[in-house]
Image: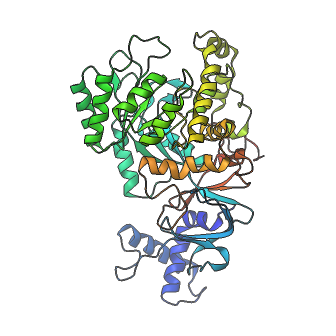
Amino acid sequence: MRLTLLWQAHTNLPNIIYDMNREMIGMPAGSMSRLAKQRWIVSSLASLAMGGALSAATPAMAETVVLRDFTLIDGTGHAPLAHQALVMTNGRITWVGSAAAVKVPAGATVEKLAGKYLLPGLIDSHVHLGLVDGITQDLKYQTPQSINAQLATYAAYGITSVQALGTEKDFVFSMQAAQKAGRPDRARIFTVGQGVVFKGSYGGVPGLDQKVSTPAEARRMVDAQAAKGADMIKLWVDDEFGSLPDRMPASISSAVIDEAHRDHKKAVAHIFYRDNLEELMREGINGFAHTVRDQPMSRQDIATMKAKGVWQMAATLSREASFTYATLPFLNDPFFSRGVTPQVLSELGSAQRAQKLRSSPTFPKYPQVLRLAMQNFAAEAKAGVSYGMGTDSGPSARFPGYFAHWEMELMVKAGITPMQAIVAATSSNARFIGAKDIGTVAPGKWGDLLVLDANPLTDIRNTRKISAVFIAGKPVRTIWQTCAGRPADACGRQP
């Protein structure tokens, strides 16, 4: 899709200012000499720098974009609607309806999307930001620059918002605040700050002060994250296949959950074992960041989740699937390879890495872990448990953006429909996160949009056929316009 007029607005500002001023005073085209025009442009740019490009008496011109003639999949589960249009003003949707009824505001940029499918931007409810350089993981790599680079990658894949779950330094709150104060040009951040880890147990990352030993320490940590602005509170209850001596005990987890609720925050838990799911539900947990993966869930477990409104906020099927491969199966898929450097591709495909993974004592366990994760997720969905879409992307070899599309494919393979997967990744995730102005295509929402060349309801893999991505009403670079670590023309054409 060519968004010519929008890109001209970025690259041709001096001439735009000239034309705007000429039209405002009624001056005919061609009435200025080239030298006079240049002086006019310089004067206008100087006025702009001083805050006076258009005088205080002149109202600021709204930025209006009209998209039309697409098929709408609005994120609510409503049946798709053909021949639709929408209007975005200053980044927010102001009107949605039939293309035959749209009234194009004067001066609006119009883009015709005949044959395209328009969805809300996708939301990944479980990520970790800035932890790697290539596939080498270390907290030292977590900087605002590395996180911004990842957020741009998420956006390129149509993931326009992410929920970071517990391994981010405090500057992530400032990054989130800056996004909220303006109009971001990459994926939006929601964050829990630092999640709570029981000392000696599984969770967190080296270098962050996340470990607690007593209920009092746990409560203080929850209060600290809430005071910083955490969107919810995260805790880990796991022992990494029994390789660690302890899991977080109920005295700690119950204190975390209770204090989160006192601070008016939801509490979400990393779990692996069914017995921890049952205990945490007794304690009042709001959601799980993974499915149960040690055994099948009972009907009573699932009935309790539904009755208490406990969410399966992320099944992380793509995480479990990735661990079943010594060599990942998609290295030659351009939808993946465009987003990583040749060095990363080489490391992922090396025989040494494959041998190291095969020799790990946990490697043979993951096929069964994946089967149980898919089985339990399918049972929850069939019973009516609320669920979202999340990947646990961000640690080594779990790739931002690509894994969300793989996750949706695996969710459908587990037994839900493509429409249900899309709703999980849009309005359902927005509802659990508490984000009221994203997740659906409706007036008042931000213009965070994904435009596809093919119908994802007939094949969920069509979410990969990305035509355009908008964040806050502006187009951003897509994965098909990306060629990481190589010249722009080195990746070939989009298939």
From the top left corner, tell me how far across and down residue 203 is, in percent.
41, 23
Q: Residue furthest front?
A: 300
Residue at image location 73% in from the left, 66% down from the top: 114
* Observer-nearest of 80 and 209: 80
Residue at the spot 56% in from the left edge and 81% down from the top edge: 106
Q: Nearer the viewer, residue 374 or 483?
A: 374
- Specify the color scheme: rainbow
Closer to the camera in the image, 95 or 422: 422
Where residue 181 appears, as percent x and y from the top left, is 36, 57
Q: Left or right: 310 with respect to 115?
A: left
Question: In this rendering, is residue 376 above or below 28?
Answer: above
| Residue 129 visible here | no
337 on left or right of 210: right
Report x, y in % for residue 1. Answer: 70, 60
Q: Is residue 124 visible?
A: yes
The residue shown at (24%, 25%) is 215
User: Is residue 60 depicted above or below 246 in this figure?
Assistant: below
Q: Quadrant of residue 173?
A: top left
Dividing the picture into quadrants, the one containing residue 453 is bottom right
Q: 130 or 365, which lies in front?
A: 365
